[in-house]
Image (cartoon, helix red, strand yellow):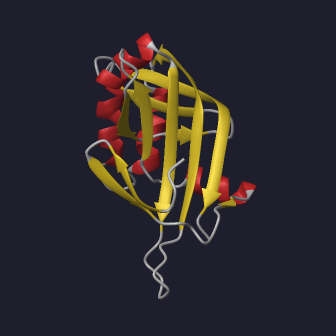
């Protein structure tokens, strides 16, 4: 465990500050607020050597499963075909307060991803409309849903939801 103060990790010096405030668990309504927001999620996948890669991605949360769509030839889709283990995070950080804190809320999800074709484009349209609401939203949803896309379903085995204050 790294102790507060400077610590050497390889050729890097990392400064660790002891936290005076432990993160608090998010309430169920706060978790829903974060996952129902139009924030971009971050999907973590593992390459064949076990190294993580993080991809920003639009998503839909239905209360049980995180669904995303992607083009089938994208690197994160290839990595999920090789290893279904995945992580997902959505985080929201507020402006700096007068005491120097930047309150944040985050929901982290760990699980195994399942891939399937979005043959009718329904998930792609739904997710696109979740993020785009302006005059071009309908055209973008139509264009995206006409592309061959894969649905990535992440069923949580663990959810960690905390706030800084």
- Which residue corresponds to the image point at 38% horizontal and 50% vertical from the top-left? 132
- Which residue corresponds to the image point at 54% horizontal and 25% vertical from the top-left? 153
Counting every numbered tag in the picture gives 0
Classify 63 as above or below 34.
Answer: above
Check the image and name the residue furthest to the right.
28
Check the image and name the residue furthest to the bottom.
98
The one of 40 and 117 positioned closer to us in this rendering: 40
The one of 87 and 49 positioned closer to us in this rendering: 49
The one of 30 and 138 positioned closer to us in this rendering: 30
Along the horizontal axis of the image, is 165 left or right of 116? Answer: right
- Which residue corresponds to the image point at 36% horizontal and 17% vertical from the top-left? 49
User: Looking at the picture, how far across and down is residue 6, in whole percent?
Assistant: 39, 60
- Examine the image and state in which quarter residue 138 appears: top left
Check the image and name the residue furthest to the left.
11
User: Looking at the picture, how far across and down is residue 102, in whole percent?
Assistant: 47, 73
User: Looking at the picture, how far across and down is residue 129, in whole percent?
Assistant: 44, 45
- Which residue corresponds to the image point at 52% horizontal and 22% vertical from the top-left? 85
For the C terminus, the quadrant is bottom right
Along the horizontal axis of the image, is 90 left or right of 155? Answer: left
User: Looking at the picture, how far across and down is residue 114, in whole percent?
Assistant: 54, 18
- Examine the image and state in which quarter residue 156 appears: top right
The one of 149 and 102 positioned closer to us in this rendering: 102
């Amino acid at each position: 465990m790294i102790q507060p103060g400077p610590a050497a990790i390889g050729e890097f010096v990392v400064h660790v500050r002891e936290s005076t405030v432990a993160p608090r668990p998010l309430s169920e309504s706060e978790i829903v607020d974060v996952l129902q927001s139009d924030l971009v999620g971050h999907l973590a996948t593992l390459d064949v050597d076990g190294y993580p890669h993080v991809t920003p991605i639009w998503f839909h949360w239905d209360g049980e499963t995180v669904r995303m769509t992607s083009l089938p030839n994208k690197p994160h889709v290839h990595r999920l075909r090789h290893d279904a283990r995945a992580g997902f995070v959505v985080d929201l950080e507020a402006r700096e307060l007068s005491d120097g804190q930047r309150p944040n809320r985050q929901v982290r999800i760990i699980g195994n991803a399942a891939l399937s074709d979005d043959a009718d484009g329904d998930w792609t349209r739904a997710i696109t409309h979740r993020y785009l609401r302006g005059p071009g939203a309908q055209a973008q949803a139509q264009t995206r849903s006409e592309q061959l896309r894969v649905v990535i379903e992440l069923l949580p085995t663990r959810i960690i939801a905390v706030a800084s204050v």
